[in-house]
Image (cartoon, rainbow, N blue to C red):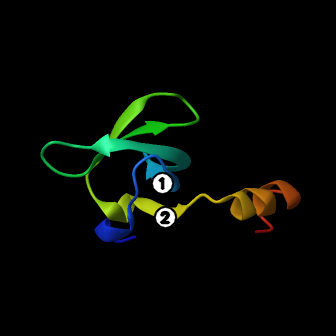
């Protein structure tokens, strides 16, 4: 993703510690990047660049994930 596409209080698919996770962007970091919350663990994380974020999680995307078994999407 691009830096200009990131919106606060929206959820994104991201790579956290090498594994995919859902992340909610809480605020901008004072130096650079964003502060987010890993929705799986509830921990706060720092996202230094927009390249860690894969795509915004929308209701239609969540429906697709729930409809198909793992690996078919």
| Label 1, residues with CA under 10 Å away: few <14, some 14-19, many ≥20 | many
Residue at 73 percent across and 56 percent down: it is 62
In terms of image quadrants, where is residue 37?
Answer: top left
Q: Establish if 49 lies above or below 28.
A: below
At x 71%, y 57%, the residue is: 59
Residue at 24% x, 52% y is 33
Relative placement, left or right, of 39 versus 71 is: left
Quadrant where the N terminus sits is bottom left
Q: Disc 1 designates what residue?
A: 14
Q: Is residue 68 above or below residue 41?
A: below
Instruction: Determine the residue positioned at 12% across, 46% down.
Output: 31
Percent of width and height locating residue 69:
85, 57
Q: CA distance from mark 2 to mark 1?
A: 5 Å
Q: Are marks 2 and 1 in contact (CB under 8 Å)?
A: yes
Helix, strand or loop at mark 2 = strand
Give x and y (percent) for residue 7.
40, 57
Q: Which is more N-terminal, label 1 or label 2?
A: 1
Depicted 43 relative to depicted 24: above or below: above
Q: Is residue 69 above or below residue 29?
A: below
Number of on-image labels: 2
Q: Is residue 35 left or right of residue 20?
A: left
| Residue hosting label 2 | 54
Looking at the image, which is closer to me, 65 or 69?
65
Residue that sits furthest to the top in the current view: 42
Residue 24 x %, y %: 48, 44
The quadrant where residue 26 appears? top left
Q: Which part of the image, by quadrant, shows the C terminus?
A: bottom right
């Amino acid at each position: 993703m691009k830096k200009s596409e990131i919106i606060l209080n929206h959820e994104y698919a991201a790579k956290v510690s090498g594994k995919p996770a859902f992340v909610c962007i809480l605020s901008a970091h004072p130096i650079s990047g964003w502060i987010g919350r890993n929705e799986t663990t509830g921990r706060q994380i720092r996202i230094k660049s927009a390249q860690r974020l894969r795509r915004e999680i929308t209701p239609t995307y969540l429906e697709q994930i729930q409809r198909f078994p793992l690996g078919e999407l």
